[in-house]
Amino acid sequence: MEDKRYLTFALGKGRLAKKTLQLFEKIGITCEEINDEKTRRLIFVNEELKLRFFLAKGPDVPTYVEYGAADIGVVGKDTILEEARNIYEVLDLGFGKCRMCICGPEHAEELLKHHEQIRVATKYPRIARDYFYNKKHQTVEIIKLNGSIELAPIVGLSEVICDIVETGATLRENGLMVLEEVCPLSARMVVNQVSMKMEHERITKILYDLKSMIQE
Ligand code: PRP
């Protein structure tokens, strides 16, 4: 048999990685070691299937895939939109569902309606800019934060935020609400553009198996 090269997967660390590995297991792609929470190893190999897996920070996954350091990646749609890398988005994995929304206190709704010059705090400046400038044609000031975005309108840093809403609990517990929806989000599979051609058969088979599992 000809020697296959390794297909490398980059998985966004955290909740998505766990669900991804559970889904992969269902189609016979296994990697026991990666589930060991105590290990400090960074890369995991399935010799039999010639597959390699590594965990990376979510925003780095599209970078690894664009440069071909990973053939395939699994990451949230939010990260794909924000990073805007040259990669193929090939499959919606159907989990990690949430929404990108403009949120704030109730009274901020008026500011949005009347296209006032407001401040928008967000971890996703590209998504926020695209939404306000290209879709709403509203001039805003975008303030980049790295987490706990809901704090911004509470302490007066911004009027609204552009952030992920999953259950809505964080908003509710902080007296904020969804004012506008930007787009729905979920976990997606992405593929390097050259790998898609060079490893077409293997990648297509994985996609086919995943699709049939997701539809069940
Ligand atoms: C995300 C997001 C919201 C929260 C939404 O934050 O930024 O804060 O989850 O979830 P909910 O609607 O179910 O309350 P994350 O926990 O990823 O941490 P972060 O604040 O560091 O971004």
Image (cartoon, rainbow, N blue to C red):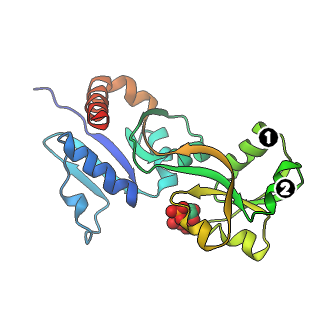
> Would residue 52 appear left or right of 186 to someone viewing this image?
left
User: The N terminus appears in which quarter of the rendering?
Assistant: top left
Which secondary structure, mark 1? loop
Please identify the quarter of the rendering in which residue 215 is found.
top left
Q: Nearer the viewer, mark 1 or mark 2?
A: 2
Q: CA distance from mark 1 to mark 2?
A: 14 Å
Q: Which residue shows up at 74% across the image and 65% down it?
A: 105
Q: Nearer the viewer, residue 177 or 7?
A: 177
Q: Which residue is denoted by mark 1 in the rendering?
A: 136
Q: Which residue is denoted by mark 2 in the rendering?
A: 110
Q: Would you say residue 147 is visible in this rendering?
A: no
Residue 32 position, x and y percent, is 18, 56
Q: Which residue shows up at 65% across the image and 66% down it?
A: 149
Q: Looking at the image, in which quadrant does ligand 1 appear?
A: bottom right
**How many numbered marks does the figure carry?**
2
Residue 3 position, x and y percent, is 17, 31
> Would residue 204 appear left or right of 134 to someone viewing this image?
left
The amino acid type found where label 2 is placed reads Glu
Q: Nearer the viewer, residue 146 or 92?
A: 92
